[in-house]
Amino acid sequence: MQSKTNVNEMLADSFKVLAFKIPIDKITIKEITDGAGVIRPTFYNHFRDKYELLEWMIYKDILEPVIPLMQKGQIKKSMIQIFDNLLKDKKFYKKVVRLEGQHSCEKIARQFIKDLLYTFINEQTSEMKLAKRGLTTSLMAEYYAQSMAFVVIQWIKMDMSITPEQMADLFEYITTHSMDEVIVEMK
């Protein structure tokens, strides 16, 4: 009997193979299960639909590896790792970024990053101190998740043409400087 993780990985591998042949929104559960060598009910024992499988893939491939870095407060290294992980499977993520609407790549990325940042910010700050400034952990997590997701999506759409280190530097720069500072520097 195969473990849940092995079945998840088989389904993910099948999904990736199909994504190179068929637009993601056109891939069927039957095609995924046929490629993985399992029956349809097996798929539904693991995932609700192909988008939940995609979310699992993004989490396992991109975000889970950065959790230890985030826990150590290594934000820049976390960003570099995210970009490196995306680069390893560039062709696939260029397909994923084309998804629009309810299951868009940006929406998936933003939610995962928000959850990750919410936990990180909660561990690093006092909600009471944040409240004195009119902030909440949730607001901060949402703000930074939106900006990170935007940067990641734009990088993929730019064909990942600059290095992960350069992207991490860019993100660090725009999040540590006010708009006024950036404008003055660019004059």
Image (tube, rainbow, N blue to C red):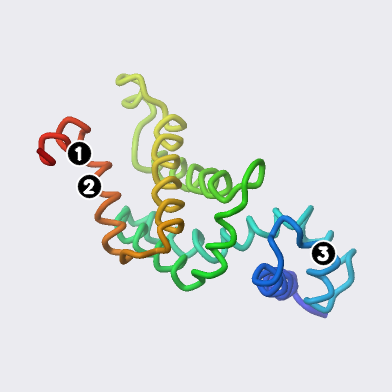
The residue identified by callout 2 is 173
Tell me the CA gap for discs 3 and 1. Answer: 46 Å
Label 2 neighbourhood size at 10 Å, few (<14), some (14-19), many (20+)? few
User: Cβ–Cβ below 8 Å for labels 2 and 3?
Assistant: no
First along the sequence among labels 2 and 3: 3
Residue at position x 34%, y 26% in the image:
130
For this view, does 174 lie left or right of residue 45?
A: left
Q: Which mark is residue 177?
A: 1
Residue 135 in the image: above or below residue 166: above
User: Cβ–Cβ below 8 Å for labels 2 and 1?
Assistant: yes
The residue identified by callout 3 is 43
The amino acid beneath tag 1 is His
From the viewer's perspective, is the residue at label 2 or at label 3 nearer?
2
First along the sequence among labels 3 and 1: 3
Q: Nearer the viewer, residue 98 or 117?
A: 98
Residue at position x 88%, y 66% in the image:
40
Provide residue 17's location: percent of width, then percent of height. 68, 75
Using the rendered view, name the quadrant where residue 107 is placed: top right
The amino acid beneath tag 3 is Phe
Residue 61 in the image: above or below residue 105: below
Using the rendered view, name the quadrant where residue 155 is placed: bottom left
The amino acid beneath tag 2 is Tyr
For this view, does 105 lie left or right of residue 12?
A: left
Question: Tag 3's secondary structure?
Answer: helix
Residue at position x 67%, y 67% in the image:
19
Residue at position x 72%, y 73% in the image:
14
Looking at the rendered image, the quarter that the N terminus falls into is bottom right
Tell me the CA gap for discs 2 and 1. Answer: 6 Å
Tell me the CA gap for discs 2 and 3. Answer: 43 Å
